[in-house]
Amino acid sequence: MADFYQHGMITTLQRLKERPSGEIDEELVAITRKRDTVLLLPALFSEFETPSMPVIIGELKKVRYLKRIVLSLDRADERQFQKARKLMGEIPTEVVVVWHDGPRMQELYRDLAANDFNIQRPGKGRSVWMTLGYVLEDEDVYAIALHDSDILNYTRDFLSRLVYPVVHPAIDFEFSKGYYARAGERLYGRATRLFYIPLIRAMKRILNYNPFLDYLGNFRYPLSGEFALISTLARSIRISPTWGLEVSLLSEVYQRASLNRICQVEITESYEHKHQVLDKTNPDAGLIRMATDIAEALFRILSQDGIVMSSSFFRTLFTAYIEESRLVIEKYHALSMINGLSYDRHSEIEAAEAFVKSLQTATEEFIRNPVGIPMLPAWVRVRAAIPDFSERLTEAVRLDNSL
């Protein structure tokens, strides 16, 4: 049985029972007649060649409350773009594909660079940011949901539960963050379990009470890629082009939304997707790079808030993190044992040791360049700098989808 405990800072909407899919969907069909809702679906073309995309497409065929699905397609040539369009075209809902590698979109990226916007770093963050700009051009859109494209056990309930708190007028949240358990025969989610959680706890020990760290510590799965938000909030947020995207997004929401209008919602009991590799010999890839980017994002957010991070702070942080990671490993060992899960304590300790290296790298990079890779700007700023950019973006996407 799920718990119904509320942490106090943000509302937690647990999955207390199996609610029939048709029941919640019928509610959403009625609600979204007045509150247009769009799904933003970021994907690499390679994900269309995995088992996850056929499952996702099959489930999205059953969804009747979305105004539009916008596929943010990366790393695709023209043949692959057309294939993705054809596959997504099986969905009855209107589908638009934003082809980031196409010549029209590349010209728009060059125009942004010519106007001094730092958008040179490709990746999920940049693609989501550009696609968000396209979605926001439709002023009738009330809410936008986003989830990843590598979910192996996807059902339409994922999306329904994510969207429901944001669009339902009786509860009327501005932002909902999806969470779930990452467990099968063993526990997954190492970046969250063994890096993010002990890092936040170590920082809280050093800084005592800090409301932002308290806020971050309230999320059950802060690094999940699933969220929904209202369009007025989406227009004002900046997005990180790095692996720090999720942490930076939570920071932007914290600064711009009232805490009592932020929630986290349990979208499924378990979640299966591709797992990032932890390769200690390659610090610029996989979980090691992810952890480095997350730590750097945290350092910059805290420094912007006036927190002074001296050399003594970082020395203390390393040792405090090591202790906190040791404590969580003990807890996850106990959790695994009582649930009959396999638990490789040695590999968990090795992962935590590798994350110490990530923390040290993040510290060195932050000290060398406190500003770091700039956040991608809010769309209100882009419109102020290039008044006709949104119209040109909309036209480029329209022409690509007419090919």
Image (cartoon, grey):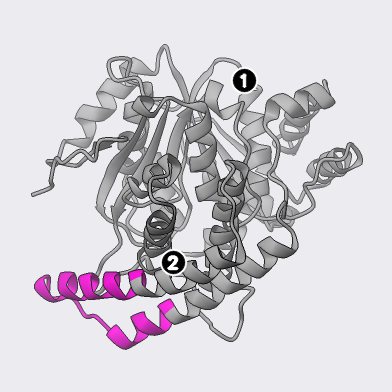
287 sits to left or right of 155: right
- Residue 299 on the magenta span: no
**Residue at 72% across, 34% down:** 397
373 sits to left or right of 17: right
Q: Return the mark for residue 274.
A: 2
Q: Secondary structure at mark 2?
A: loop
Real-space Cα separation, disc 2 to disc 1, in angstroms: 33 Å
Q: Is residue 182 above or below residue 298?
A: below
135 sits to left or right of 207: right
Residue 159 image point, x, y percent: 36, 39
Is 211 in front, or is 62?
A: 211
| Residue at which label 1 appears | 138
- Residue 349 on the magenta span: yes
**Residue at 33% across, 41% down:** 156
Q: Return the mark for residue 269.
A: none
Is 139 in front, or is 252?
A: 252
